[in-house]
Amino acid sequence: MIDRADRAEELFRMGYNCSQSVFAAFADRLNLTVEEAAKMASPFGAGFGKLREVCGAVSGMTMLAAYTDGYSKATDVEPKKALYGLIQRMCSEFEESQKSIICREMLGLEKGEDLAEPPVRTEEYYASRPCLAAVREAAAIADKYLDFK
């Protein structure tokens, strides 16, 4: 059985962004290739297009919840309530562990700071940022809460 947190870390270390890493860690369960999953999750990295808003790992995690528990009819009130409750529980657990669900807060940045091109990923980069822990935590939470049929 695949350890989804390990897989998310592996994908992040390969160069995928945080959202891609979490979402693509479940690609086999989504009947997608890693490349297809990565493409779908690509705009959500670095807090939504590097705007440093909601952590990309959280975005990837919530995209997975949409796959397992999402609703498609505008009038589906009960499934909507259930999905929102699930997202709130998952995000609460993530926030308890990582201290925030906001990318810039996790990185200690101000709004608008660090919007330039992504840095080269080195061991120093990985050691100085919360991103590896975030992708691992988001993947573990998704694996805990979501039932991929």
Image (cartoon, rainbow, N blue to C red):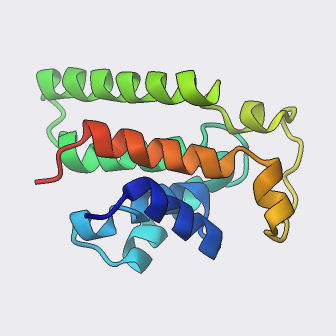
- Left or right: residue 138 versus residue 147 is right
Quarter the C terminus occupies: bottom left
Give the image location of residue 46, x and y in percent. 68, 51
Left or right: 42 in relation to 25: right
Q: At 61% from the left edge and 75% from the top edge, which residue is drawn?
A: 14
Q: In which quarter of the image is the N terminus?
A: bottom left
Q: Which residue is drawn at 82% across and 59% down?
A: 125
Residue at position x 17%, y 45% in the image:
147
Q: Name the quadrant containing residue 15.
A: bottom right
Residue 138 at what x, y percent from top left?
47, 43
Q: Is residue 37 visible?
A: yes
Q: Is residue 63 above or below residue 118?
A: above
Q: Where is residue 90 in the image (x, y as percent from the top left)?
A: 39, 29
In the figure, residue 113 lies in which quadrant? top right
Q: In the rendered image, is residue 41 in sight?
A: no
Residue in view at x 50 percent, y 42 percent: 137
125 or 92: nearer the viewer: 125
Relative vertical location of residue 26 with respect to residue 74 in this rendering, above or below: below
From the top left corner, tell me how far across and down residue 135 is, in percent: 55, 50
Query: How many badges with numbers are in the image?
Result: 0
Closer to us: 105 or 3: 3
